[in-house]
Amino acid sequence: MLRLTPKWNLITHLNPKSPISESYRTLRTNIDHSTINQKLQIIMVTSSKPGEGKSTTCANMAVAFAQANKRVLLIDADLRKPTQHYLFGTSNRNGLTTALFNQKPLKDIVQHTAVDNLFIVHAGPTPPNPSELLSSPQMAELLDEARKSYDVIVLDTPPIVTVTDAQVVAVMSDGVVLIVQSGQVSKEHVLKAKSLLDHVKAKLLGVVLNNVNSSHADSYSYYYGDSEG
């Protein structure tokens, strides 16, 4: 079993008692209680534009679910600019694109992490056609396979306003969390992101307001709100 050292960005793993880690646990709880009759198993995370902290939020959210004794699979579906292998210190040589191109089973590309109950599928080599690959029948089959083996599947996807990849993946997800960096994104940009999700009838679970100045969280906290708010 390969267990490599994760980066400091994984604060929920390295400093679970910090205020920021507690914010991630609050996010986990809010997601768990965001629906009554629908099972949330595949959760997609996106942002409106690059640099809003979606990949870090995605990774820590996955850790928080794993710490709740759930079997979690984190999939880096940002095939254009993958990040999760940097955060976890694992290899990106094989990953999602490897499986989709070569029709490999999910078990062949899953890697262990240093976090108990958390497994990861990296993006793999950058393909020439990310959107087409993500919308392929092979991708749908891979997610169906993941549902059978994991309690929670977290998908890290590209910014939704920038490329169409996130819209494609949103259709296959049970719910979407939108990351917004405080003070860096206009209201119009956020509304555009929501409009694109609405267009494919994605279920927006809520918005994480990232990098909020707050004395309660060392100038770094999260806000989780209903999509209607």
Image (cartoon, rainbow, N blue to C red):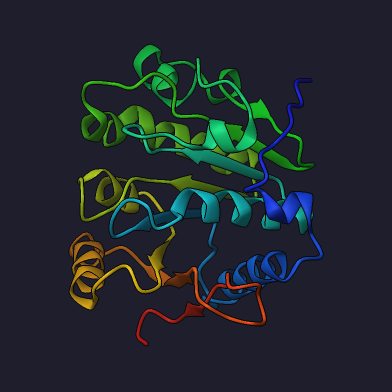
State which quarter of the image contains the N terminus. top right
Residue 91 at x, y percent in the picture: 58, 20
Residue 145 at x, y percent in the picture: 52, 34
**Where 73 falls versus 54 (above or below)?**
above
Identify which residue is drawn at 75% across, 43% down. 117
Q: Residue furthest bottom?
A: 229
Identify which residue is drawn at 75% across, 50% down. 13
Horizontally, residue 130 falls left or right of residue 217, namely left
Quarter-of-image position of residue 196: bottom left
Identify which residue is drawn at 55% across, 43% down. 147
Identify which residue is drawn at 76% across, 35% down. 114
State which quarter of the image contains the C terminus. bottom left
Q: Nearer the viewer, residue 173 or 61?
A: 61
Residue 4 at x, y percent in the picture: 73, 27
**Where 121 falls versus 66 (above or below)?**
above
Q: Nearer the viewer, residue 19 or 190?
A: 19
Q: Nearer the viewer, residue 112 or 80?
A: 80
Horizontally, residue 65 falls left or right of residue 180, namely right
Count of numbered labels shown in the rendering: 0
Horizontally, residue 59 falls left or right of residue 189, namely right
